[in-house]
Amino acid sequence: GKVDGSVIVTTPQDLALLDARKMISFARDSNVPIVGIIENMSTLTCPHCNNQIDVFKKGGGKKLAQELTLPFLGSIPLDADITVQSDKGDPVILSRLDSAAAKAFLDLAENCRKFLNPEESGKVN
């Protein structure tokens, strides 16, 4: 069957970025369009002081997208509620609509929709 596109998901650390490069090469060699790159586990917000903590570095996915001239679809924060709520069958996009995690998923979905329907939306962010 026809593949509409692939989404490359990476974490910010160097080894993960190396794996992402391999997947990008594979997709390009296979003539599979690349929707863009997502950086997962990007930033942790401290629950006590609300400061941002870059546990696994930050920005590697965006830098890779820029280097390879691919769309950067966005970052998903490192947030335990993503796992907890998903395991309960109540993902953060429904249970915590006002959270940074929910906003990140909504932004990613919108950017993927723009790729699949470019005539409706213009360019991907």
Image: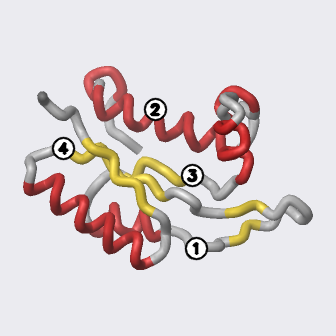
On the image, which quarter does residue 78 sit in?
bottom right
Q: As drawn, is 94 to the left or to the right of 66? A: right
- What separation in Å lies between label 3 and label 1 (alpha carbons)? 13 Å
The front one of 114 and 22 is: 22
Q: Amino acid at mark 4?
A: Pro
Label 2 secondary element:
helix
Label 3 secondary element:
loop
What is the number of the mark on residue 33?
4
Name the N-terminal-most of marks 1 and 4. 4
Q: As drawn, is 110 to the left or to the right of 113? A: right
Name the N-terminal-most of marks 3 and 2. 3
Q: Amino acid at mark 2?
A: Glu
Q: Position of residue 92 (x, y in %)?
A: 68, 36
On the image, which quarter does residue 98 sit in?
top right
> Where 6 sits versus 113, above or below?
below
What is the number of the mark on residue 56?
1
In the rendered image, which residue does mark 3 sit on?
Answer: 76
Looking at the image, the residue that sits furthest to the top is 120
Q: Position of residue 75 (x, y in %)?
A: 53, 54
Foreground: disc 1 or disc 2: 1
Q: Position of residue 73 (x, y in %)?
A: 42, 48
- What separation in Å lies between label 1 and label 2 (alpha carbons)? 26 Å
Q: Amino acid at mark 1?
A: Phe
Seen at 38% across and 29% down, the residue is 113
- What separation in Å lies between label 4 and label 3 (alpha carbons)? 22 Å
Seen at 65% across and 33% down, the residue is 91
Label 4 secondary element:
loop
Q: Quadrant of the C terminus?
A: top left
Foreground: disc 4 or disc 2: 4
